[in-house]
Image (cartoon, rainbow, N blue to C red):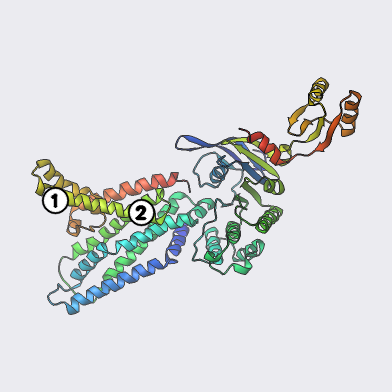
Amino acid sequence: MASDIYLTVSIDAKYDTKSIVKCEGLTFPIGSVVGILGRNGAGKTTLLKCISGLFPIQGIEWSTPYKIASLIETPRFRLDWTGRQHLLHQRELHKTDHGLVKEVINTVGLSSFIDLKVTTYSLGQKQRLGIARALVGDPDCILLDEPTNGLDPQGIVDIRELITRLHDQKKNIILSSHLLGEIQECCTHLVVLHEHRIQFSGPIEQYFQTGILIQATNPEQLETWLLSQQWNFKVHSKGFLVQEQHSTEKINTLCFEDNIVLTHLEQYEGSIEEHFVEETGNE
Amino acid sequence: MNEIIHTLRLEWKLIWSRRSVVFYLLTCFLAFAGTTLLMEQVVVGAEKGWVADVQRNLWLRNWILPLGYVWMGVQSFVEDKEQGFVAESIVRGTPRSTILISKMGSLLGVSILSLLLCIVPMIFYPSSGQQIDTLVGLPLTLLSDIVLIGWVALFGLSKRSTNGVLLRMLLLIGFDFSCRMMLWIGPNLFSSPLLEWLSENIPLLLPSTAFNCWMFWEEAWQIETLAVTVLYAIVVWGTVHLNWKKTIF
Protein backbone atom coordinates (compact mmCIF):
# COMPACT_ATOMS: atom_id res chain seq x y z
CA MET A 1 0.00 0.00 0.00
CA ALA A 2 1.40 3.40 -0.98
CA SER A 3 2.31 5.66 1.93
CA ASP A 4 0.10 8.51 0.75
CA ILE A 5 -3.01 6.34 0.82
CA TYR A 6 -4.92 6.26 4.08
CA LEU A 7 -7.84 4.10 3.07
CA THR A 8 -8.43 1.30 0.60
CA VAL A 9 -11.93 0.02 -0.03
CA SER A 10 -12.67 -3.31 -1.71
CA ILE A 11 -16.21 -4.29 -1.01
CA ASP A 12 -19.26 -6.00 -2.37
CA ALA A 13 -22.04 -4.76 -0.11
CA LYS A 14 -25.26 -6.72 -0.44
CA TYR A 15 -28.70 -6.31 1.00
CA ASP A 16 -30.12 -9.82 1.09
CA THR A 17 -28.73 -11.03 -2.24
CA LYS A 18 -28.91 -7.74 -4.14
CA SER A 19 -25.59 -5.96 -4.65
CA ILE A 20 -25.89 -2.35 -3.52
CA VAL A 21 -22.29 -1.17 -3.80
CA LYS A 22 -19.39 -2.93 -5.44
CA CYS A 23 -15.88 -1.59 -5.75
CA GLU A 24 -12.39 -3.00 -5.94
CA GLY A 25 -9.24 -1.24 -4.70
CA LEU A 26 -10.76 2.21 -4.34
CA THR A 27 -8.15 4.41 -2.63
CA PHE A 28 -8.33 7.67 -0.69
CA PRO A 29 -5.15 9.80 -0.63
CA ILE A 30 -3.97 11.62 2.50
CA GLY A 31 -4.91 15.28 2.71
CA SER A 32 -7.73 15.04 0.22
CA VAL A 33 -11.32 16.14 0.18
CA VAL A 34 -12.99 13.30 -1.66
CA GLY A 35 -16.38 13.88 -3.19
CA ILE A 36 -18.63 10.91 -3.82
CA LEU A 37 -20.97 11.70 -6.63
CA GLY A 38 -23.90 9.72 -7.91
CA ARG A 39 -27.53 9.78 -8.74
CA ASN A 40 -30.20 8.90 -6.17
CA GLY A 41 -29.84 5.26 -5.18
CA ALA A 42 -26.36 4.92 -6.70
CA GLY A 43 -24.96 3.78 -3.35
CA LYS A 44 -23.28 6.92 -1.97
CA THR A 45 -24.68 6.61 1.55
CA THR A 46 -24.10 2.85 1.57
CA LEU A 47 -20.45 3.37 0.66
CA LEU A 48 -20.07 5.88 3.52
CA LYS A 49 -21.83 3.47 5.88
CA CYS A 50 -19.44 0.70 4.82
CA ILE A 51 -16.44 2.94 5.49
CA SER A 52 -17.75 4.05 8.87
CA GLY A 53 -18.66 0.52 10.00
CA LEU A 54 -22.40 1.15 10.19
CA PHE A 55 -22.83 -1.36 7.37
CA PRO A 56 -20.92 -4.36 8.71
CA ILE A 57 -18.74 -5.61 5.89
CA GLN A 58 -15.20 -6.79 5.22
CA GLY A 59 -12.84 -5.02 2.82
CA ILE A 60 -12.16 -1.67 4.50
CA GLU A 61 -8.44 -1.24 5.11
CA TRP A 62 -7.01 1.75 6.95
CA SER A 63 -3.30 2.19 6.36
CA THR A 64 -2.89 3.29 9.99
CA PRO A 65 -5.43 3.18 12.80
CA TYR A 66 -7.51 6.16 11.86
CA LYS A 67 -9.97 7.97 14.06
CA ILE A 68 -13.06 8.59 12.03
CA ALA A 69 -16.25 10.50 12.58
CA SER A 70 -19.34 10.68 10.49
CA LEU A 71 -22.48 12.62 9.80
CA ILE A 72 -24.56 10.25 7.75
CA GLU A 73 -28.11 11.02 6.64
CA THR A 74 -30.05 13.57 8.68
CA PRO A 75 -28.32 14.49 11.94
CA ARG A 76 -30.16 12.84 14.83
CA PHE A 77 -30.18 14.16 18.38
CA ARG A 78 -31.93 13.98 21.70
CA LEU A 79 -34.28 16.91 21.42
CA ASP A 80 -34.43 17.55 25.18
CA TRP A 81 -30.65 17.96 25.38
CA THR A 82 -28.75 21.13 24.60
CA GLY A 83 -26.06 21.25 21.96
CA ARG A 84 -23.45 21.41 24.71
CA GLN A 85 -24.77 18.26 26.37
CA HIS A 86 -24.37 16.40 23.08
CA LEU A 87 -20.83 17.62 22.67
CA LEU A 88 -19.91 16.73 26.27
CA HIS A 89 -21.33 13.25 25.83
CA GLN A 90 -19.30 12.89 22.66
CA ARG A 91 -16.18 14.14 24.42
CA GLU A 92 -16.67 11.51 27.09
CA LEU A 93 -17.22 8.81 24.46
CA HIS A 94 -13.98 9.69 22.69
CA LYS A 95 -12.07 10.60 25.89
CA THR A 96 -10.83 13.86 24.35
CA ASP A 97 -9.78 17.10 26.09
CA HIS A 98 -12.39 19.45 27.49
CA GLY A 99 -10.74 22.32 25.65
CA LEU A 100 -11.57 20.70 22.34
CA VAL A 101 -15.30 21.24 22.93
CA LYS A 102 -14.78 25.01 23.20
CA GLU A 103 -12.56 25.00 20.15
CA VAL A 104 -15.10 23.05 18.10
CA ILE A 105 -17.95 25.33 19.18
CA ASN A 106 -16.00 28.29 17.83
CA THR A 107 -14.88 26.50 14.67
CA VAL A 108 -18.40 25.47 13.72
CA GLY A 109 -20.00 28.74 14.85
CA LEU A 110 -22.32 27.30 17.48
CA SER A 111 -21.57 29.76 20.32
CA SER A 112 -24.84 31.69 20.18
CA PHE A 113 -27.14 28.70 20.52
CA ILE A 114 -25.00 25.96 22.08
CA ASP A 115 -26.89 26.12 25.40
CA LEU A 116 -30.34 25.98 23.84
CA LYS A 117 -32.26 22.74 23.58
CA VAL A 118 -31.90 20.99 20.24
CA THR A 119 -35.65 21.08 19.75
CA THR A 120 -35.33 24.83 19.06
CA TYR A 121 -32.62 24.38 16.40
CA SER A 122 -33.16 25.01 12.71
CA LEU A 123 -32.03 22.39 10.19
CA GLY A 124 -28.87 24.36 9.48
CA GLN A 125 -28.07 24.61 13.19
CA LYS A 126 -28.62 20.87 13.58
CA GLN A 127 -26.31 20.26 10.65
CA ARG A 128 -23.62 22.37 12.32
CA LEU A 129 -24.14 20.56 15.60
CA GLY A 130 -23.82 17.25 13.74
CA ILE A 131 -20.49 18.36 12.31
CA ALA A 132 -19.40 19.65 15.74
CA ARG A 133 -20.31 16.31 17.28
CA ALA A 134 -18.14 14.61 14.68
CA LEU A 135 -15.22 16.98 15.35
CA VAL A 136 -15.24 16.56 19.13
CA GLY A 137 -13.74 13.11 18.65
CA ASP A 138 -10.71 14.81 17.03
CA PRO A 139 -10.97 12.58 13.97
CA ASP A 140 -8.39 12.14 11.24
CA CYS A 141 -11.10 11.50 8.69
CA ILE A 142 -14.61 12.93 8.57
CA LEU A 143 -17.42 11.37 6.56
CA LEU A 144 -20.20 13.75 5.57
CA ASP A 145 -23.32 12.59 3.79
CA GLU A 146 -24.99 15.39 1.85
CA PRO A 147 -23.88 18.01 4.38
CA THR A 148 -25.76 20.88 2.71
CA ASN A 149 -29.02 19.02 2.29
CA GLY A 150 -31.96 21.27 3.10
CA LEU A 151 -29.83 24.29 3.94
CA ASP A 152 -30.49 27.83 2.76
CA PRO A 153 -27.91 29.51 0.45
CA GLN A 154 -26.06 31.11 3.38
CA GLY A 155 -25.99 27.76 5.21
CA ILE A 156 -24.53 26.09 2.12
CA VAL A 157 -21.78 28.73 1.88
CA ASP A 158 -21.04 28.36 5.62
CA ILE A 159 -20.73 24.58 5.42
CA ARG A 160 -18.56 24.88 2.31
CA GLU A 161 -16.24 27.31 4.12
CA LEU A 162 -16.16 25.00 7.10
CA ILE A 163 -15.09 22.09 4.90
CA THR A 164 -12.30 24.24 3.45
CA ARG A 165 -11.19 25.20 6.99
CA LEU A 166 -11.14 21.57 8.06
CA HIS A 167 -9.12 20.68 5.00
CA ASP A 168 -6.65 23.41 5.96
CA GLN A 169 -6.39 21.76 9.37
CA LYS A 170 -5.15 18.60 7.56
CA LYS A 171 -8.34 16.64 8.11
CA ASN A 172 -9.26 14.10 5.47
CA ILE A 173 -12.82 14.56 4.35
CA ILE A 174 -15.04 12.21 2.39
CA LEU A 175 -18.35 13.77 1.43
CA SER A 176 -21.19 12.56 -0.68
CA SER A 177 -23.47 14.80 -2.61
CA HIS A 178 -25.57 15.00 -5.69
CA LEU A 179 -24.91 18.74 -5.88
CA LEU A 180 -22.32 18.91 -8.63
CA GLY A 181 -21.29 22.52 -8.00
CA GLU A 182 -20.65 21.76 -4.36
CA ILE A 183 -18.36 18.86 -5.25
CA GLN A 184 -16.51 20.95 -7.83
CA GLU A 185 -15.88 23.76 -5.36
CA CYS A 186 -14.91 21.73 -2.29
CA CYS A 187 -13.20 18.58 -3.44
CA THR A 188 -9.73 17.65 -4.58
CA HIS A 189 -10.65 14.10 -5.56
CA LEU A 190 -13.73 12.51 -6.97
CA VAL A 191 -15.46 9.13 -6.88
CA VAL A 192 -18.37 8.68 -9.26
CA LEU A 193 -20.82 5.93 -8.46
CA HIS A 194 -23.22 4.76 -11.08
CA GLU A 195 -25.62 1.86 -10.71
CA HIS A 196 -23.79 0.64 -7.60
CA ARG A 197 -20.40 0.53 -9.32
CA ILE A 198 -17.41 2.88 -9.36
CA GLN A 199 -17.42 4.68 -12.68
CA PHE A 200 -14.53 7.05 -11.97
CA SER A 201 -12.09 7.71 -9.17
CA GLY A 202 -9.16 10.09 -9.15
CA PRO A 203 -8.17 13.76 -8.98
CA ILE A 204 -11.12 15.95 -9.84
CA GLU A 205 -9.37 17.65 -12.79
CA GLN A 206 -9.16 14.31 -14.58
CA TYR A 207 -12.92 14.10 -14.65
CA PHE A 208 -13.33 17.29 -16.66
CA GLN A 209 -13.43 17.15 -20.44
CA THR A 210 -10.90 19.68 -21.61
CA GLY A 211 -9.86 20.55 -25.15
CA ILE A 212 -10.84 22.88 -27.95
CA LEU A 213 -14.51 23.07 -28.78
CA ILE A 214 -15.25 23.76 -32.45
CA GLN A 215 -18.31 23.94 -34.63
CA ALA A 216 -18.71 24.73 -38.31
CA THR A 217 -21.44 25.79 -40.70
CA ASN A 218 -21.24 22.28 -42.12
CA PRO A 219 -20.78 19.79 -39.23
CA GLU A 220 -20.52 16.74 -41.52
CA GLN A 221 -17.67 18.35 -43.44
CA LEU A 222 -15.94 19.23 -40.15
CA GLU A 223 -16.28 15.67 -38.83
CA THR A 224 -14.83 14.22 -42.07
CA TRP A 225 -11.98 16.68 -41.84
CA LEU A 226 -11.26 15.80 -38.19
CA LEU A 227 -11.18 12.11 -39.09
CA SER A 228 -8.79 12.81 -41.97
CA GLN A 229 -6.48 14.66 -39.54
CA GLN A 230 -6.50 11.55 -37.27
CA TRP A 231 -7.09 13.74 -34.20
CA ASN A 232 -8.66 12.68 -30.92
CA PHE A 233 -12.06 14.28 -30.69
CA LYS A 234 -15.46 13.71 -29.14
CA VAL A 235 -18.88 14.66 -30.30
CA HIS A 236 -20.14 17.31 -27.88
CA SER A 237 -23.59 18.87 -27.56
CA LYS A 238 -22.09 22.16 -28.77
CA GLY A 239 -19.93 20.71 -31.56
CA PHE A 240 -16.72 18.68 -31.51
CA LEU A 241 -14.28 18.60 -28.63
CA VAL A 242 -10.74 18.29 -29.98
CA GLN A 243 -8.36 16.75 -27.43
CA GLU A 244 -5.01 17.53 -29.04
CA GLN A 245 -2.08 19.74 -28.09
CA HIS A 246 -2.91 22.42 -30.64
CA SER A 247 -3.63 26.09 -30.15
CA THR A 248 -6.94 27.59 -31.19
CA GLU A 249 -5.03 29.76 -33.71
CA LYS A 250 -3.53 26.70 -35.39
CA ILE A 251 -6.89 24.91 -35.66
CA ASN A 252 -8.50 28.04 -37.03
CA THR A 253 -5.76 28.41 -39.66
CA LEU A 254 -5.92 24.75 -40.72
CA CYS A 255 -9.71 24.87 -41.07
CA PHE A 256 -9.51 28.12 -43.06
CA GLU A 257 -6.95 26.55 -45.41
CA ASP A 258 -9.31 23.58 -46.04
CA ASN A 259 -12.32 25.87 -46.65
CA ILE A 260 -14.13 25.00 -43.41
CA VAL A 261 -16.02 27.92 -41.97
CA LEU A 262 -15.97 27.75 -38.18
CA THR A 263 -18.87 29.23 -36.23
CA HIS A 264 -17.50 28.39 -32.81
CA LEU A 265 -13.96 28.04 -31.48
CA GLU A 266 -13.03 28.09 -27.81
CA GLN A 267 -10.62 26.64 -25.27
CA TYR A 268 -13.01 24.39 -23.35
CA GLU A 269 -12.58 23.74 -19.61
CA GLY A 270 -15.74 21.74 -19.06
CA SER A 271 -17.54 21.06 -15.80
CA ILE A 272 -18.39 18.06 -13.67
CA GLU A 273 -22.02 18.69 -14.40
CA GLU A 274 -21.70 18.33 -18.14
CA HIS A 275 -19.52 15.26 -17.94
CA PHE A 276 -21.61 13.62 -15.25
CA VAL A 277 -24.87 14.14 -17.10
CA GLU A 278 -23.26 12.93 -20.31
CA GLU A 279 -21.91 9.77 -18.65
CA THR A 280 -24.86 8.85 -16.49
CA GLY A 281 -27.84 10.87 -17.51
CA ASN A 282 -28.99 9.23 -20.70
CA GLU A 283 -29.32 5.67 -19.40
CA MET B 1 -12.35 -5.00 29.63
CA ASN B 2 -11.67 -1.27 29.98
CA GLU B 3 -13.68 -0.70 26.82
CA ILE B 4 -16.68 -2.55 28.27
CA ILE B 5 -16.47 -0.55 31.52
CA HIS B 6 -16.17 2.71 29.58
CA THR B 7 -19.18 1.91 27.39
CA LEU B 8 -21.19 0.59 30.34
CA ARG B 9 -20.54 3.82 32.23
CA LEU B 10 -21.75 5.88 29.28
CA GLU B 11 -24.86 3.73 28.89
CA TRP B 12 -25.58 4.04 32.58
CA LYS B 13 -25.32 7.82 32.27
CA LEU B 14 -27.60 7.81 29.23
CA ILE B 15 -30.23 5.81 31.11
CA TRP B 16 -30.06 8.15 34.10
CA SER B 17 -30.30 11.21 31.88
CA ARG B 18 -33.85 10.14 31.09
CA ARG B 19 -36.52 11.01 33.60
CA SER B 20 -38.31 7.70 33.15
CA VAL B 21 -35.77 5.76 35.24
CA VAL B 22 -36.21 8.08 38.21
CA PHE B 23 -39.96 7.91 37.81
CA TYR B 24 -39.85 4.11 37.55
CA LEU B 25 -37.70 3.64 40.64
CA LEU B 26 -39.68 6.20 42.63
CA THR B 27 -42.86 4.39 41.68
CA CYS B 28 -41.30 1.10 42.78
CA PHE B 29 -40.27 2.54 46.13
CA LEU B 30 -43.59 4.21 46.85
CA ALA B 31 -45.60 1.20 45.74
CA PHE B 32 -43.55 -1.25 47.79
CA ALA B 33 -43.29 0.97 50.84
CA GLY B 34 -47.00 1.73 50.66
CA THR B 35 -47.99 -1.91 50.29
CA THR B 36 -45.70 -2.94 53.13
CA LEU B 37 -47.01 -0.31 55.50
CA LEU B 38 -50.57 -1.09 54.51
CA MET B 39 -50.18 -4.81 55.13
CA GLU B 40 -48.13 -4.48 58.32
CA GLN B 41 -50.00 -1.64 59.99
CA VAL B 42 -53.50 -1.40 58.59
CA VAL B 43 -54.90 -4.59 57.05
CA VAL B 44 -56.03 -6.89 59.83
CA GLY B 45 -55.31 -10.54 59.19
CA ALA B 46 -52.70 -9.91 56.49
CA GLU B 47 -49.67 -12.10 56.64
CA LYS B 48 -46.90 -10.23 58.46
CA GLY B 49 -43.10 -10.24 58.34
CA TRP B 50 -40.54 -9.58 55.64
CA VAL B 51 -40.94 -12.88 53.82
CA ALA B 52 -44.60 -12.18 53.19
CA ASP B 53 -43.79 -8.56 52.36
CA VAL B 54 -41.10 -9.46 49.82
CA GLN B 55 -43.36 -12.00 48.16
CA ARG B 56 -46.18 -9.48 47.94
CA ASN B 57 -43.89 -6.80 46.58
CA LEU B 58 -42.33 -9.14 44.03
CA TRP B 59 -45.81 -10.05 42.89
CA LEU B 60 -46.69 -6.39 42.56
CA ARG B 61 -43.45 -5.66 40.74
CA ASN B 62 -43.91 -8.48 38.29
CA TRP B 63 -47.49 -7.71 37.47
CA ILE B 64 -47.53 -3.97 36.96
CA LEU B 65 -44.10 -2.41 36.92
CA PRO B 66 -42.54 -4.35 34.00
CA LEU B 67 -44.41 -1.97 31.70
CA GLY B 68 -42.15 0.82 32.96
CA TYR B 69 -39.15 -1.44 32.51
CA VAL B 70 -40.17 -2.26 28.94
CA TRP B 71 -40.39 1.47 28.24
CA MET B 72 -36.83 1.95 29.46
CA GLY B 73 -35.70 -0.92 27.26
CA VAL B 74 -37.38 0.72 24.28
CA GLN B 75 -35.61 3.98 25.06
CA SER B 76 -32.27 2.24 25.33
CA PHE B 77 -32.55 0.08 22.21
CA VAL B 78 -34.72 2.17 19.90
CA GLU B 79 -34.40 5.81 20.93
CA ASP B 80 -30.63 5.53 21.25
CA LYS B 81 -30.60 4.23 17.69
CA GLU B 82 -32.95 6.98 16.49
CA GLN B 83 -30.93 9.67 18.23
CA GLY B 84 -27.62 8.50 16.81
CA PHE B 85 -25.93 7.33 20.02
CA VAL B 86 -25.47 3.76 18.80
CA ALA B 87 -24.11 4.94 15.45
CA GLU B 88 -21.63 7.26 17.19
CA SER B 89 -20.28 4.40 19.27
CA ILE B 90 -19.93 2.12 16.25
CA VAL B 91 -18.17 4.79 14.17
CA ARG B 92 -15.81 5.39 17.10
CA GLY B 93 -14.84 1.73 16.83
CA THR B 94 -16.57 0.31 19.87
CA PRO B 95 -17.26 -3.38 19.14
CA ARG B 96 -20.93 -4.04 18.55
CA SER B 97 -21.01 -6.81 21.15
CA THR B 98 -19.61 -4.36 23.74
CA ILE B 99 -22.43 -1.93 23.00
CA LEU B 100 -24.97 -4.72 23.36
CA ILE B 101 -23.45 -5.97 26.64
CA SER B 102 -23.36 -2.46 28.07
CA LYS B 103 -27.00 -1.86 27.18
CA MET B 104 -28.04 -5.12 28.78
CA GLY B 105 -25.82 -4.46 31.80
CA SER B 106 -27.13 -0.98 32.44
CA LEU B 107 -30.75 -2.11 32.19
CA LEU B 108 -29.96 -4.99 34.51
CA GLY B 109 -28.57 -2.41 36.93
CA VAL B 110 -31.95 -0.68 36.96
CA SER B 111 -33.62 -4.04 37.52
CA ILE B 112 -31.36 -4.75 40.51
CA LEU B 113 -32.11 -1.32 41.96
CA SER B 114 -35.83 -1.89 41.66
CA LEU B 115 -35.46 -5.25 43.38
CA LEU B 116 -33.53 -3.66 46.22
CA LEU B 117 -36.35 -1.19 46.57
CA CYS B 118 -38.68 -4.18 46.96
CA ILE B 119 -36.72 -5.34 49.95
CA VAL B 120 -35.71 -2.08 51.63
CA PRO B 121 -39.16 -1.03 52.88
CA MET B 122 -39.64 -4.17 54.93
CA ILE B 123 -36.24 -4.89 56.50
CA PHE B 124 -37.58 -3.68 59.81
CA TYR B 125 -40.23 -6.37 59.96
CA PRO B 126 -38.86 -9.64 61.36
CA SER B 127 -40.29 -12.78 59.93
CA SER B 128 -40.08 -16.48 59.72
CA GLY B 129 -41.22 -18.80 56.96
CA GLN B 130 -40.00 -20.00 53.59
CA GLN B 131 -37.11 -17.60 53.30
CA ILE B 132 -35.21 -19.64 50.71
CA ASP B 133 -38.16 -19.57 48.30
CA THR B 134 -38.37 -15.83 48.68
CA LEU B 135 -34.68 -15.35 48.05
CA VAL B 136 -34.82 -17.60 44.96
CA GLY B 137 -37.53 -15.30 43.62
CA LEU B 138 -35.06 -12.41 43.39
CA PRO B 139 -32.58 -13.92 40.88
CA LEU B 140 -35.49 -15.43 39.00
CA THR B 141 -36.97 -11.96 38.66
CA LEU B 142 -33.66 -10.68 37.30
CA LEU B 143 -33.53 -13.53 34.81
CA SER B 144 -37.03 -12.75 33.63
CA ASP B 145 -36.16 -9.08 33.24
CA ILE B 146 -33.32 -10.16 30.97
CA VAL B 147 -35.80 -12.10 28.83
CA LEU B 148 -38.21 -9.18 28.78
CA ILE B 149 -35.54 -6.76 27.61
CA GLY B 150 -34.35 -9.38 25.12
CA TRP B 151 -37.75 -9.26 23.40
CA VAL B 152 -37.60 -5.47 23.32
CA ALA B 153 -34.10 -5.62 21.80
CA LEU B 154 -35.27 -8.19 19.26
CA PHE B 155 -38.20 -6.05 18.12
CA GLY B 156 -35.98 -2.95 18.24
CA LEU B 157 -33.70 -4.48 15.61
CA SER B 158 -36.39 -4.62 12.96
CA LYS B 159 -38.56 -1.65 13.99
CA ARG B 160 -37.17 1.86 13.96
CA SER B 161 -39.85 3.62 15.97
CA THR B 162 -40.59 3.35 19.68
CA ASN B 163 -44.30 3.00 18.93
CA GLY B 164 -43.63 0.11 16.57
CA VAL B 165 -41.68 -1.78 19.24
CA LEU B 166 -44.24 -1.10 21.96
CA LEU B 167 -46.99 -2.29 19.63
CA ARG B 168 -45.09 -5.49 18.94
CA MET B 169 -44.64 -6.05 22.69
CA LEU B 170 -48.36 -5.55 23.25
CA LEU B 171 -49.17 -7.93 20.40
CA LEU B 172 -46.84 -10.54 21.86
CA ILE B 173 -48.46 -10.30 25.28
CA GLY B 174 -51.93 -10.23 23.70
CA PHE B 175 -51.13 -13.31 21.61
CA ASP B 176 -49.74 -15.08 24.65
CA PHE B 177 -52.79 -14.21 26.73
CA SER B 178 -55.18 -15.38 23.99
CA CYS B 179 -53.36 -18.68 23.64
CA ARG B 180 -53.52 -19.28 27.36
CA MET B 181 -57.22 -18.48 27.43
CA MET B 182 -57.99 -20.79 24.52
CA LEU B 183 -55.93 -23.62 25.96
CA TRP B 184 -57.73 -23.16 29.26
CA ILE B 185 -61.25 -22.97 27.81
CA GLY B 186 -60.78 -25.50 24.96
CA PRO B 187 -60.86 -28.76 26.95
CA ASN B 188 -63.97 -27.54 28.78
CA LEU B 189 -65.81 -27.05 25.50
CA PHE B 190 -64.60 -30.07 23.55
CA SER B 191 -63.61 -33.36 25.02
CA SER B 192 -60.44 -34.39 23.24
CA PRO B 193 -57.32 -36.10 24.62
CA LEU B 194 -55.13 -34.03 22.29
CA LEU B 195 -56.67 -30.79 23.48
CA GLU B 196 -56.19 -31.85 27.08
CA TRP B 197 -52.56 -32.70 26.42
CA LEU B 198 -52.01 -29.33 24.75
CA SER B 199 -53.79 -27.57 27.57
CA GLU B 200 -51.48 -29.18 30.09
CA ASN B 201 -48.16 -28.74 28.31
CA ILE B 202 -48.24 -25.77 25.96
CA PRO B 203 -48.86 -22.92 28.47
CA LEU B 204 -45.50 -23.60 30.07
CA LEU B 205 -43.78 -22.92 26.74
CA LEU B 206 -45.49 -19.60 26.04
CA PRO B 207 -43.38 -16.40 26.28
CA SER B 208 -45.15 -15.10 29.37
CA THR B 209 -43.79 -18.04 31.38
CA ALA B 210 -40.44 -16.32 31.08
CA PHE B 211 -41.82 -12.86 31.87
CA ASN B 212 -41.44 -13.70 35.50
CA CYS B 213 -44.94 -15.00 35.79
CA TRP B 214 -46.82 -11.90 34.87
CA MET B 215 -49.75 -14.22 34.73
CA PHE B 216 -48.88 -17.33 36.70
CA TRP B 217 -46.69 -16.34 39.58
CA GLU B 218 -47.07 -19.57 41.50
CA GLU B 219 -45.43 -21.51 38.64
CA ALA B 220 -42.27 -19.47 39.01
CA TRP B 221 -41.18 -21.70 41.82
CA GLN B 222 -41.18 -24.80 39.66
CA ILE B 223 -38.02 -26.09 38.02
CA GLU B 224 -39.80 -26.36 34.63
CA THR B 225 -40.56 -22.65 34.70
CA LEU B 226 -36.94 -21.89 35.50
CA ALA B 227 -35.79 -24.13 32.63
CA VAL B 228 -38.15 -22.45 30.15
CA THR B 229 -37.05 -19.01 31.33
CA VAL B 230 -33.38 -19.89 30.89
CA LEU B 231 -34.16 -21.35 27.45
CA TYR B 232 -35.97 -18.17 26.41
CA ALA B 233 -33.08 -16.05 27.71
CA ILE B 234 -30.58 -18.02 25.62
CA VAL B 235 -32.70 -18.15 22.45
CA VAL B 236 -33.87 -14.51 22.52
CA TRP B 237 -30.48 -13.00 23.37
CA GLY B 238 -28.69 -15.38 21.01
CA THR B 239 -30.92 -14.16 18.17
CA VAL B 240 -30.41 -10.54 19.21
CA HIS B 241 -26.64 -11.01 19.31
CA LEU B 242 -26.50 -12.61 15.85
CA ASN B 243 -28.71 -9.95 14.28
CA TRP B 244 -27.08 -7.04 16.13
CA LYS B 245 -23.78 -7.93 14.45
CA LYS B 246 -25.42 -7.80 11.01
CA THR B 247 -27.66 -4.77 11.50
CA ILE B 248 -27.14 -1.73 9.29
CA PHE B 249 -27.36 1.36 11.52
| Residue B98 screen position, x and y as percent | 44, 52
Which residue occupies the foreground of this view, B190 or A115? B190
Q: Earlier in the sequence, mark 1 or mark 2?
A: 2
Q: Residue at x 75, y 29 (%)?
A: A234
Which residue occupies the foreground of this view, A75 or B115? A75
Q: Is residue B109 left or right of residue A242?
A: left
**Picture layout, residue B134 above or below residue A238:** below
| Residue A96 screen position, x and y as percent | 58, 61
Considering every residue shown, the one lying at the far left of the view is B191
Q: Quadrant of residue A166?
A: bottom right
Query: Residue under circle 2?
Result: B152
Q: Which numbered dot is residue A251?
A: none
Mark 1–mark 2 distance (CA, rounded to whole Å): 30 Å
The quadrant of the picture occupied by the N terminus of chain A is top right
Query: Residue under circle 1?
Result: B185
Q: Are marks 1 and 2 on the same chain?
A: yes
Q: Amino acid at mark 2?
A: Val
Which residue occupies the foreground of this view, A140 or B158? B158
| Residue A162 screen position, x and y as percent | 68, 56
Q: Chain of mark 1?
A: B
Between circles 1 and 2, the one closer to the viewer is: 1
Local secondary structure at mark 1:
helix
* Disc 1 to disc 2: CB gap under 8 Å: no
Q: Is residue A20 left or right of residue B123?
A: right
